[in-house]
Image (spheres, rainbow, N blue to C red):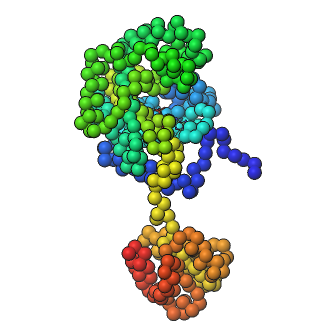
Amino acid sequence: MKYYAPKGLSDILPEEIPYWHAVEGEVRSAMSSYNYREIRTPMMEKTEVFARGVGEDTDVVSKEMYTFDDKGGRSMTLRPENTASVVRAYLEHKFFGKEELSKWYYVGPMFRYEAPQKGRSRQFHQYGAEAIGSDDPALDAELITLAIDILTSLGLEDVGLKLNSIGCPADREDYIEELVSYLEPKQEGLCADCQERLTTNPLRILDCKNETCQEIVKDGPVMTDHLCEDCQVHFDEVKSYLGELEVDYVIEPKLVRGLDYYTKTVFEVFSEDLGAQDALVGGGRYDGLVELFGGEPTPAVGFAGGIERLVLLLEELERVSHSGEGLDLYVATIDEESKKVAVKIQRELRKVGLITEVDYLGKSLQGQLGYADRYDAKYTAILGPRELEDDELTLRNMESGDQIKVSLDNYVEDIGKRITD
Ligand code: HAM
């Protein structure tokens, strides 16, 4: 064996695909009932889209991006997330002049150079939604319920929501000042990364995974004590809409999220099934990003969920049905001549949507019947010299073993009816 997939990048094998189809199908159907339209942006962007959009001092930009110079010497980056690309596309195609509120969704691969572990990989897939053009707190609540509805309709029962507000930039400045004066006398106890964050990006210290850092920030000041009136009213309204929608939440004052574009509402959705620790979904408001990219001030809110960790959870919970994967019909043949007829028959049946297969491995009739069994064929059609002579085929019900003759004149209708009945 000579080649392996690169570390942190995985093949999604045929046996895992039913889970992916279940997730993608549910995402598309929920997005469409919530009136979000799909957008597909390129897999890579000019590096500055993420460097500016997500923020130079975030882990994602400073440590995790796949960045390279293309043959023309331009710095390019494989997308580590899609919000910055969506905002770039919104401005590039002047959607601010075309629609008052752009509600878009996406599904696709993202790339982050992280330490791979269960549910964390270097190429991973996200589904996400972005609503650009309104600061209505009801829209924050809509995105939160959309994120939760996708998970519950996939069969997750215990879905938890962590909610916080990180206010506007002025509130944050205020808060950061207090946070830094609280942390400075304790900086010796912080991890090396956080000692640096104290000057570069103190908010990041709040979500550092290091236990001593967490212990230190535990008793520190909280963001929600520093909200201006406008941000406080917005936060209260989001909570009140969630109340109307009967969505439970826990206020998590230390939740700041790892990307710099957030303002006001931030949230994460977890599954309590199997005590999963990592967030399935993360999102929030980013009212300053369109302007940062050169547009008019335009409020926006969105979220993204990771498909790998969701699939892992669904596999463990066995919540996805595998039914419908087997063959409808296996067409078994006895000689060259019947094989020629079989390929025609199978093509006609495939045209009406049946899942069929013939023998490509030179198996005996017995071997073909065994193969049909292994692939859960509902029926097997048997064609041999005798059948051809009588212008018919033998149709065997694989469950009961019953056999009947079907005329080759109207087999499409006849077989189709039996299989769909
Ligand atoms: P994020 O929290 O960085 O937010 O990622 C969202 C979700 O993507 C995470 O909750 C997780 O499920 C999944 N995810 C992230 N990194 C990995 C990884 N290395 N391996 C597997 N899954 C991963 C964003 O990306 C924002 N763009 C979300 C957003 C949209 N905010 C507003 N609009």
Question: Quadrant of residue 112 in the image?
Answer: top right
Residue at the location (46% across, 38% down)? Answer: 280
**Camera-side residue: 100 or 55?**
55
Examine the rendered structure and indicate whether residue 366 appears above or below residue 117.
below
Is 169 positioned to the left or the right of 183 in the image? Answer: left
Residue at the location (60% across, 48% down)? Answer: 11
Q: Is residue 360 visible?
A: yes
Residue 16, image x, y percentages: 54, 53
The quadrant of the picture occupied by the C terminus is bottom left
Residue at the location (49% across, 39% down)? Answer: 276
Residue 10, image x, y percentages: 61, 45
**How many badges with numbers are in the image?**
0
Residue 302, image x, y percentages: 38, 33
**Camera-side residue: 160 or 85?**
160
**Camera-side residue: 85 or 269?**
269
Examine the rendered structure and indicate whether residue 110 appears above or below residue 350.
above
Q: Is residue 356 visible?
A: no
Residue at the location (49% across, 43% down)? Answer: 274
Residue 265, image x, y percentages: 35, 26
**Camera-side residue: 300 or 184?**
184
Examine the rendered structure and indicate whether residue 298 appears above or below residue 306.
above
Question: Quadrant of residue 69 in the image?
Answer: top right
In the picture as drawn, the residue positioned furthest to the right comes out as 2
